[in-house]
Amino acid sequence: MNGTLEGFLYLVAAVLFILGLKRLTSPATARAGNRLAALGMLIAIVVTLFDAGVIGYGAIVAGIVVGGAVGAYLAKVVEMTAMPQLVAAFNGFGGGASALVALSALSDTGGDAGLRAYVTIGLSILIGAVTFSGSFVAFGKLQGVLPGRPVSFPGQVAADLALAATAVIGIILLGVGGLHTWAWIIMAAALVLGVTRTLPIGGADMPVVISLLNSASGLAASAAGFVIDSNALIISGALVGASGLILTNIMVKAMNRTLRNVLFSAFGGTTAAPGATDDIDKITRSASADDVAVTLGYAERVIVVPGYGLAVAQAQHVLRELAQLLEDRGVDVRYAIHPVAGRMPGHMNVLLAEADVDYDRLHDLEDVNGDFPSTDVALVVGANDVVNPSAREDPTSPIHGMPILDVDRARNVIVVKRSLSPGFAGIDNPLFYNDNTLMFFADAKAGLAEVVSAVKEL
């Protein structure tokens, strides 16, 4: 391929990446942004393969067809509850691919690539392998294959430091001597480090971990781009790495945590903390579907707070139907989205978009929190930790200081939940026992369907 044409097409791909990323900042333009970025990646892949001349036209077409078919199939069959696992898997495959690219490039060096090339290869292997194994541990935790609680062993910190030191020393020795054996040592140490560093992180912090690993997969790709002199890979990897770090920073701020605290504090999981209970009798105010329908149907302003329970029950469509019924009755219905609601960044936004909820009705924490005192009903569907007043009022709480949605300040609160079981943080929620709270114990989808029927009869 002509060098000028190749450079121009790579530039087009880079511009499409940037424009696509920009459009991903808004739910209203996210789909178009995704298409632009996908088109840019298609251009970059085709140009790279044709320019490298390593495979024929048939293999290129076959790869595009098979890969596209697998992607389309996953997009159709993977449920929203499993979307975080899919993202984790994508991160892992991205990191693994970068490590393999670096290993492949290493085999072509002939042992005289120079310090800069060897160090770049070593970094790509290190970051890519850590991302690969760490992402699949995160996948296992989210899928329930591995315990969601923090898992650690005596001397783990020392072992992690030893693994990290081994990898770093390996990169130095690979750069100095060019001995390819060190690449495999780096790979082995990095794979184990990814496992041992992710296992001690609890389920409460999985959204942050996914975001961080997404950033790591981008950095690994960018490093691989330097290894094979691919401008498109350098640019795309840098964009993913930078955006992932920015999102990670947003997430830890939303939890009033630090990244160090997330990675090393072993916070949150599936085991309930003292005080958590499934005893419904402890609640002073429980509600039926008719009670909920009357409270919502005669309100003027309602704010819906979705959480992971909404995704588990696949109740977004019936929630949208309920909101439409209320709007037809003249009720102002909006949605309050906490940055860490669900199991991955933007989980609730994507879930509600799937149900065709108007983007203009989705409001971030900072924009909507001041409106709760003037709201007639706050409808909490499957959320827990992000509406826990302990974060604001109890200095002894593990989540104290975390910004929450102030639903308890609404005139009435309706919580749709199966039981009083705790959220990811493993602590009880005093919101459930407030005098202005009605607990509607039900599966979100089935329960809201009953409320829809009741509202229709008002």
Image (cartoon, rainbow, N blue to C red):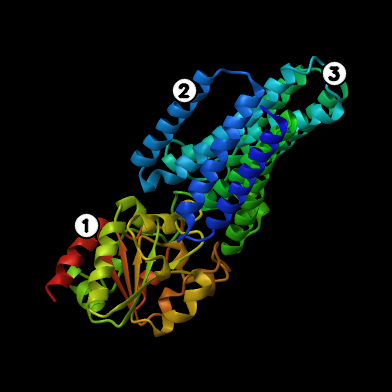
- For badge 2, the amino acid type reads Ala
Query: How packed is label 2: few (under 14 Cα within 10 Å), some, or many (20 or more)?
Result: few
In the rendered structure, which disc, 2 or 1, sits on the residue that comes first in sequence?
2
Image coordinates for residue 84, horizontal then vertical, percent: 46, 45
Query: How packed is label 1: few (under 14 Cα within 10 Å), some, or many (20 or more)?
Result: some
Which numbered mark, 1 or 3, is in the foreground of this view? 3
Outermost bottom residue: 374
At numbered mark 2, what does the secondary structure look like: helix, strand or loop? helix
Vertical comparison of 370 with 192: above or below: below
Q: Is residue 156 visible?
A: no
The residue identified by callout 3 is 112
Which numbered mark, 2 or 1, is in the foreground of this view? 2
The residue identified by callout 1 is 446
Picture residue at 85% right of the left edge, 18% below the top: 112
Image quadrant containing the C terminus = bottom left
Image coordinates for residue 52, horizontal then vertical, percent: 66, 23
Q: Nearer the viewer, residue 230 or 289?
A: 230
At numbered mark 1, what does the secondary structure look like: helix, strand or loop? helix
Distance from the alpha carbon under mark 2 to that under mark 1:
44 Å
Picture residue at 68% right of the left edge, 41% below the top: 219
- For badge 1, the amino acid type reads Ala
In the rendered structure, which disc, 1 or 3, sits on the residue that comes first in sequence?
3
Q: Are marks 1 and 3 in contact (CB under 8 Å)?
A: no
The residue identified by callout 2 is 62
In the rendered structure, which disc, 3 or 2, sits on the residue that comes first in sequence?
2
Q: Are marks 3 and 2 in contact (CB under 8 Å)?
A: no
Vertical comparison of 278 with 148: above or below: below
- For badge 3, the amino acid type reads Asp
